Image: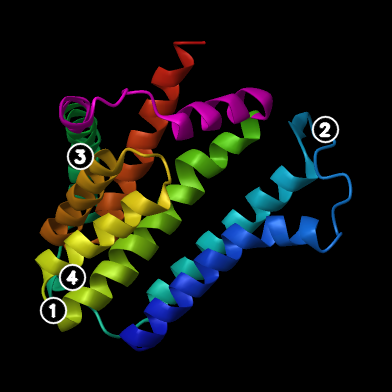
Amino acid sequence: MSLKKYSFLTLFVYGLSLLTPSLLIYWGFMPNADKMLVILGLTFTPYMLSVILCSLLGVFLLTYFYRHQNEPLTFERKKFSALKILLLGSAGIFLSLVIQNYASLVEAWLFQSTPESKNTQSITEMILKMPIYVLVTTVTAPIMEEFVFRRAILGFVSRYANFFIGAVISSLFFAIAHQDGHLLIYFSLGFFFSLLYYFSGSIWTSVVTHIGMNLVVILLQFTTY
């Protein structure tokens, strides 16, 4: 699979996985989308079930595309062992939290913004109502975002420009996509994930960091409730 085809399919499937639950409601397939259900001891709504299923399918397809693309990026030729990837990704969790904290301070200084994230708060409230949603926020969403913003967007741009330009553009899209108002925070994190990817030559390094960071942020958020 060529880089162009890979990037297009990755973006298409990602967008489809995000839109499908809302489209099912719009087309009338889920008239009781907010009705609470209990299945196998888990509580969720039909809408949330569709979100989880779409995200799981999205991860499967994006991983499949990645394994079947045949145009590796130049920096992917580095050979980091699975252990090194895990160690670097784990160290990246701590560094990402530090970056997030300093970016928040800079934002507050420049724009007099508050450090609270409406996006994180709404996600936490959703998890409190439906704990199964933690699967999306800490596993499937980070994996898909790394394939989309790092491997597809950064990879495509860097092939025709260079890594720095690709990292800037992909990080900007990453920040805008979160629709949280904290553009500097998400841009800084996106750029850091890009550096992890570049340094290790493996997308799985940034995946480990992204998953770990989201998990820690959610756990810390629970302490305020």
Mark 4–mark 3 Cα distance, whole angstroms, equals 18 Å
Q: Are marks 2 and 1 in contact (CB under 8 Å)?
A: no
Could you classify mark 1 by the number of other residues whose Cα lies within 10 Å: few (under 14), some (14-19), or many (20 or more)? Answer: few
Vertical position of residue 56 compared to residue 9: above or below: above
Could you tell me if residue 184 is visible in this image? Answer: yes
> Is 118 in front, or is 12?
118
| Magenta stretch, main secondary structure class | helix
Residue 114 x/y as whole percent:
32, 23
The residue labelled by disc 2 is: 36
| Quarter that holds the N terminus | bottom left
Q: In the drawing, does residue 13 fall left or right of residue 11?
A: right
What's drawn in magenta, residue-wise? 103-130
What residue is shown at x 48% (from left), y 49% (from top)? Answer: 141
Residue 76: assigned label: 4
Mark 1–mark 3 Cα distance, whole angstroms, equals 26 Å
Q: Which of marks 2 and 3 is nearer the N terminus?
A: 2
What residue is shown at x 29% (from left), y 44% (from top)? Answer: 183
The residue labelled by disc 3 is: 92
Mark 1–mark 4 Cα distance, whole angstroms, equals 16 Å
> Is 209 in front, or is 23?
23
